[in-house]
Image (cartoon, helix red, strand yellow):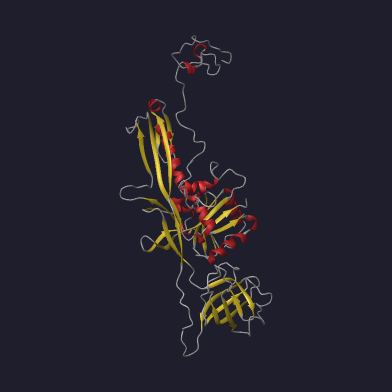
Amino acid sequence: MANVTPQFGSIKPSQKQQALETNYLNFTDGSGNDFAQQFLPEIYEQEVERYGNRTLSGFLRMVGAEMPMSSDQVVWSEQNRLHIAYNNVTCTNATTLTFVTGGTGSAFVNNVISVGQTLVVMSPTTGKELKVYVTASTANPTTGVGGATNPAVLTVKPYTQADLGGTVDFVTGTPTNLKIFVYGSEFAKGTTDATLNSVVPSFTQYSNSPIIVKERYQISGSDTAQIGWVEVATEDGTSGYLWYLKAESETRLRFEDYLEMSVIEGELVSGGSTLLSGNNIKGTQGLFSAVKERGNVVNNFSAASGLNDFDSILKNLDTQGAIEENMLFLNRATSLDFDDMLASLSAGAAGGVAYGLFENSEQMALNLGFSGFRRGSYDFYKTDWKYLNDASTRGGMATSSIDGILVPAGTSTVYDQQLGTNIRRPFLHVRYRANQADDRRMKSWITGSVGGAYTSDLDAMQVHFLSERCLVTQAANNFVLFTASV
């Protein structure tokens, strides 16, 4: 059959499925007698899913929630620390501690420590410490703005030696990096507490604004009439024979990914972006930006350091909220680093393996794509984050600036400015604009003159998508962002 070269018009169909010289069809010679010029060619009806599941969303559905809002801004307050402590205190002489953190025109520390209170004075560099009693306290008279040069000063006397020198010497070299904190107070019999300052509880207020995200799909009226059915299976679970609606469904899936990606990658307009601000483009603070600003960042985590790098993360979590259960969303390289770190340790030496959130069922955790381990008093559940691995986003690069993120599980309690009360919210949650007249969580509508819409003389169908939303990252001090030094 290799020598068969039928001429146009000489082909005769066979009544049976027989390989004869007279019914051979040449598809490739390009001489005008190819089959495609006479009949509709046979095609594979089902698309080949060569990239697997192409959607990237799902991260926020796993760790957060979505809630409506009615304003242009969401404002929340987070508690500050309960106890009184100061860093970078200078020991200027044998009895004096000075709060010097800036020069002329800079803001000095506001001292609230009172006479009669007892302190621990610590040197982070040498490990030395001393318990002292406050005999005099001078608050900074101003914030330092406008040329104030007199910082706050404490006069103290140690309990166990004559002054800040002696056995535990804080005076030598006048160290400037001391830490002090109040652990109590002591007063003589029959005295008043008039010397004690009234310390008003403080909080830090944060806010974020929603952005409007749009997408559109369009197809002409003529193309909607073309018959070209293809059997498809889409990532949202639908399947069947589609043509132009196949493309529309993919536009919808891409838009759903944008809804998540925009609040993860979002940035506020700042610096020299005058063109954006002048066009009312204000941006929104996404997850990565919030953790970089208010959370913890670990550069170049590597299994080569064993548990040293990871234990330093745990020590830092101890100083923050100490949330017991945490989830790790990592790219491939960092996930393998964790696997190598854990593989080098026995389960007993590493504190054992736990599955906490999954009722200690290994199979349940693995079915959800998580592997769990326990270190110290913390449980960690590790999974690969497709968003960091996909070649169309942050994956496929020799070096990536974002390697993964640690997200605390559970909820936090914050004061909601609009509701006027304390509320419990997931650490990560999306707020979208909505009211009784319009729900902007995810809107879609059709315009044009095709597909059931008769809104204009445009001979096409336009499918519009819109959402207005922002991400609230609460207690970002409990998050850890893994980055590379790029």
| Left or right for 458, reference 183 | left
**How many marks are shown on the rendered structure?**
0
* Quadrant holding the N terminus: top right
Q: Residue furthest front?
A: 146
Question: Which percent across, then down, holds residue 56?
Answer: 48, 44
Name the one closer to the observer, 230 or 187.
187
Instruction: Name the residue rendered at 45%, 77% in the picture.
Output: 198
Q: Is residue 78 placed above or below 116 in the rendered structure? A: above
Question: Which percent across, then down, holds residue 236?
Answer: 42, 41
Q: Residue furthest left?
A: 436
Q: Residue furthest top?
A: 10
Q: Is residue 447 placed above or below 144 in the rendered structure? A: above
Question: Which percent across, then down, holds residue 261?
Answer: 48, 47
Q: Quadrant of residue 64?
A: bottom left
For the question of whether residue 468 can be seen, the reply is yes
| Left or right for 48, reference 445 | right
Q: Residue furthest right?
A: 173
| Left or right for 218, reference 341 | left
Instruction: Name the residue rendered at 49%, 33% in the picture.
Output: 48
Name the one closer to the observer, 24 or 333.
333
Instruction: Name the residue rendered at 49%, 40% in the picture.
Output: 54
Name the one closer to the observer, 127 or 48.
127
Name the one closer to the observer, 289 or 300.
289
Question: Which percent across, then down, holds residue 306?
Answer: 63, 58
For the question of whether residue 349 can be seen, the reply is no
Instruction: Name the residue rendered at 34%, 32% in the picture.
Output: 456
